[in-house]
Amino acid sequence: MAAVCLLLAAGCGNPSDSGNGSGSGNENQSGNAGNDNPPAGSGLLQKGDAKPKIVFVSNGVADFWTIAEAGVKQAGEDLNAEVEVYMPTEGITDQKRIIEDLISKGIDGLSVSPIDPVNQTDLLNKVAEKTKLVTNDSDAPKANRLCYIGMDNYKAGRMCGQLVKEALPDGGKVMIFVGRLEQDNAKGRRQGVIDELLDREFNPSNFDEPGKVITGDKYIILGTLTDQFDRARAKANAEDTLSKHEDIDGMIGLFAYNPPLILEALKGNEKVGKVKVIAFDENDATLQGIKDGSVHGTVVQNPYVYGYKSVEVLYKIIKGESGVVPEGKFIDIPARQIRKDTVDAFWLDLKKKTGKD
């Protein structure tokens, strides 16, 4: 049986403002609750009230989710709620099994990052009939979830594309690396990068087939390689790219573990610094790479707030508070760009949140 991470509340500090990242255009954003600092020890639950049971389910195992876990635990402590975190180790079948098991046992609220939102719509709708349901990190807009907590992934993808332009101002050949394209967040990020590099108008509805070479005026996107969360395959994708495209100029990693594995492949081929690396998320190896110059920059989310806000929103909904869910059913936790001049302050804040300082 696949292992899961089960974690109960423990203090870990408050999330801070994630900042407003730059980027062109703006998708429908109906809430901006992610910029608020949740108060420590707010104690909304009155003494003697039953603790609501709230569960957070990720889309896999990664350092990104460990950060989110810290936010979940802190919110559980602040709000006097019983919280659990599960990280599926075997993809969509494992996530489905975990969710079905939770629902059969009975919970008050669930926040989930769907692995394949289209094919999981029926499952999520069944969940929504039995408990309060929100999505985080990656949305399932066709399901009956109460709201989505996260960032605008298309806009964040364009922010990543801006970093590529900074790293390669004269253009060049680039490859995109990502875990899986079934997820709503991966699709949005990838398309945002492509549209930014091709100087297209802001349009989240755009879609370019992943198997085709995409040629613009200055940039050639050689392709998009997926790994299905298989780290060995992810590294092999990077190594194969370096072997097949000796003249490649840039490598773009869209999931947290992609950039560190790209760096390992570059080191093995003695090409660190010769090929520009543009990243996503806040893996320690990525942040160290920005410090030492082997990574140009990264677009970071705020997984700590994803975890905290998931518990907070579900708690308030369970308690019958009105006005919790914005009209557009989107609670925006803005992304931001991290470069060499901001990496130290960002990393220090991250260590404080996760208890690593």
Image (spheres, helix red, strand yellow):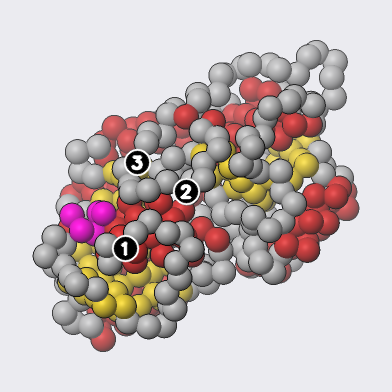
Q: Amino acid at mark 3?
A: Gly
The location of residue 10, given as percent across then percent down, is 62, 30
Q: Which class describes the residues within 10 Å of circle 3: few (<14), some (14-19), or many (20+)?
A: some
Q: Farthest residue in the left direction? A: 170
- Check disc 2 and report the residue beneath it: 27
Looking at the rendered structure, the secondary structure element under dot 3 is loop
Query: Measuring 34% from the left and 55% from the top, which residue is drawn there?
Result: 158
The mark lying in front, picked from 3 and 1, is 1
| Dot 1 or dot 2, earlier in sequence | 2
Which quarter of the rendered picture does the N terminus lie within? bottom right
Identify the amino acid type marked 1.
Arg
Q: Which residue is mark 3?
A: 21
Q: Which residues are magenta?
A: 162-166
Residue 200: numbered disc? 1
Res. 303 in view = no
Give the Cα distance between marks 3 and 1.
19 Å
